[in-house]
Image (cartoon, coloured by chain):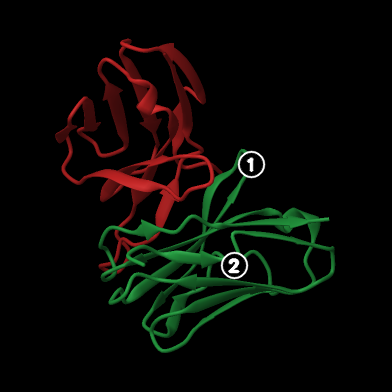
Chain colours: A green, B red
Amino acid sequence: GAGVSQSPSNKVTEKGKDVELRCDPISGHTALYWYRQSLGQGLEFLIYFQGNSAPDKSGLPSDRFSAERTGGSVSTLTIQRTQQEDSAVYLCASSWDLNQPQHFGDGTRLSIL
Amino acid sequence: TQLLEQSPQFLSIQEGENLTVYCNSSSVFSSLQWYRQEPGEGPVLLVTVVTGGEVKKLKRLTFQFGDARKDSSLHITAAQPGDTGLYLCAGAKNSGGSNYKLTFGKGTLLTVNP
């Protein structure tokens, strides 16, 4: 497809389980970003990748959160031992290069029971 | 600490009315972006403003960046039901030559009734 693709679109899991969220950026985009959107909180920056490296992990809320990117393309955001406060929409964006306009996917809605 | 304050938080108007949404901060931004987000979808970029005092028009939407680059406004003329959505402003700060890190406001939820 032409846009940023995220999967799954919805994920419901029990507290304490691990989850993996996937992002397929627009082909050719070198920069990839993860955000979290919680009710009443707006979008919160989590991490970005330039190629396969993540120079800025400052937004990750805790060490239960990690992300990787392989082949300069697909990225996975992993949340270990999920907590109820992790419930949110996780959005991925990509851009041709840093400082270029970011194009967002439709997000993964994560619900922790 | 919320660096970008958007107002109003909610706005419900009739088709044909005009409206203005505000985005304010005490911080200076190198650029400011406006997005519109519809339910179940990601934000879609509407415009980027870079220069203090800059005004950009996109059909019935007019965007203005404050002279001091701390605030911005979005004005919609003759609103239509298709304008309904969550409007988000996002500021970028230049850090080491990069301004990728966007700070988002909480958004203004606009409903335009037929």
Asked if B36 appears above or below B94 in the picture, the reply is above
Q: Residues within 10 Å of mark 2 (few under 14, many from 20)?
A: some
Chain of the residue under the numbered disc 2 shown in the image: A
In which quadrant will I find the C terminus of chain B? top left
- Kindly check if marks 2 and 1 are in contact, taking CB atoms under 8 A apart as contact: no
Chain containing the residue with disc 1: A
Q: Quadrant of residue A59?
A: bottom right
Which of the numbered marks, if any, corresponds to residue A39?
Answer: 1
* Most foreground residue, A42 or A91: A91
Q: Nearer the viewer, residue B25 or B63?
A: B63
Q: Is residue B51 left or right of residue B27?
A: left
| Left or right of A73 on screen, residue B109 | right
**Residue labelled with disc 2:** A60
Q: Residues within 10 Å of mark 1 (few under 14, many from 20)?
A: few
Q: Secondary structure at mark 2?
A: loop
Q: Residue at x 69, y 74 (%)?
A: A63
Q: Give the residue type at disc 2.
A: Leu
Number of labels in the image equals 2
**Image x and y of residue B113, in percent:** 45, 15
Residue found at the very far bottom of the displayed protein: A71
Residue sitting at x 22%, y 31%: B64
Q: Amino acid at mark 1?
A: Leu
x then y, percent, for residue A111: 73, 55
> Residue visible at 79% across and 61% down?
A83
Element type where label 1 sits in the image: loop
The N terminus of chain B, quarter of image: top right
